[in-house]
Amino acid sequence: MAKTLPIIMILLLAALSGCIGSNSSDENVQEMTFERANLNLDANIVDVKLSPGDVRAGEKVEAKLVIANTGTEKIVNESIEIKAKVKSLDDFLANLALKFMSDESKTRTFPMDFQEDIQPGSIKPLVADFQTQQELQGKNLAGKYMVTVILSVNGQKVAGKVVPITLLSGKPRDELPNTTSSNVTPTITLTAAPTETLTPEITVTPTPTPEAVTVSEPTGNTVYLRIMGWKFTESSKEIDAGDKVLWHVLDDDTFTIVEKDRKLPNITVSYKTTQFFNTTGTYRFSLYYPKMRTEPSTQTITVKLNTSQ
């Protein structure tokens, strides 16, 4: 047994260096958030899929991500850091050896860089291929792993997801089921710029933005808003400070509601959720969901002080 353990340790390290596969479900995906030095620069991983779902050790895997620019600055480059941590291996002896390994020894990191322009409020698919390893020292590298996907944009770390994956045993297949790449560049139609017409210069005095007012007592009023057809049913709503908003989802999906100016933390909802608005101002929301391929639906909620009370 003393001679067997070193071989097993080498086996585990090699397994982590090339094993990426998945049959994970969206329900098991965990979200990660990070503190941002530049509050205007932000993004979210709307969706992450590793395919094929029945990948075997030794086969190529396609990692598909959908990135949404939820900030106010243009994104010009993206860095994806994938950390694969082994949870268990199908081989009995290799699995026993995991108890003697540190978390750092169980984890391998795979960096990837992209240079895609993503305008504020828009989304972009990113795709990367991985070649898994079938076996080492006669041991098949099948097992269960946790994959952490961390997104950095323009050099700032902004979001992450943790996804459970499984690498199956069996002989690698020469041809895998067809997977449609989502890294498609949309067709852009160019139109001529309009002829510039010179007009006299007019000096406009901007209207000062009123200071926000916070109320301590709730009004007891609940404003009902719906999410249906994968979008907000109302583009704008005016409420009183102290009102409570209830978003009701009528679709079979999980949504993330993002306030564009980060006045509120991200809100995740699959059925109903409520938010208390006690500070006056304008709140601009965007709606995101898995498998999203269009621009996000938007909703503006204006909170005013009710002077009649």
Image (tube, rainbow, N blue to C red):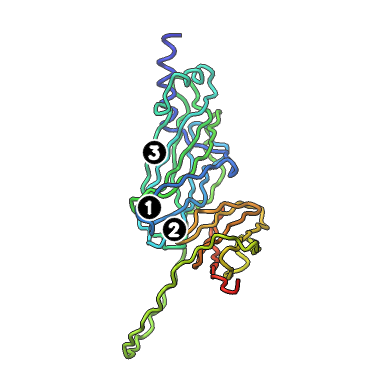
Residue 102 in view in this figure? yes
| Snapshot quadrant of residue 192 | bottom left
Which of the two labelled residues, at mark 1 and mark 2, occupies the earlier sequence position?
2
How much space separates mark 3 and mark 1, taking CA atoms? 17 Å
| Snapshot quadrant of residue 133 | top left
Residue 281 x/y as whole percent: 49, 67
Task: Choose between 276 and 1: the one closer to the eye.
Answer: 276
State the residue position of label 1.
Answer: 153
- Mark in front: 3 vs 1: 1
Residue at horizontal 40%, vertical 48%?
35
Q: Are marks 1 and 2 in contact (CB under 8 Å)?
A: yes
Q: Amino acid at mark 3?
A: Phe
Which of the two labelled residues, at mark 3 and mark 1, occupies the earlier sequence position?
3
On-image quarter of the C terminus:
bottom right
Q: Is residue 109 left or right of residue 90?
A: left
Residue at horizontal 54%, vertical 38%?
22
Tag 1, which secondary structure?
A: strand
State the residue position of label 2.
Answer: 69
State the residue position of label 3.
Answer: 110
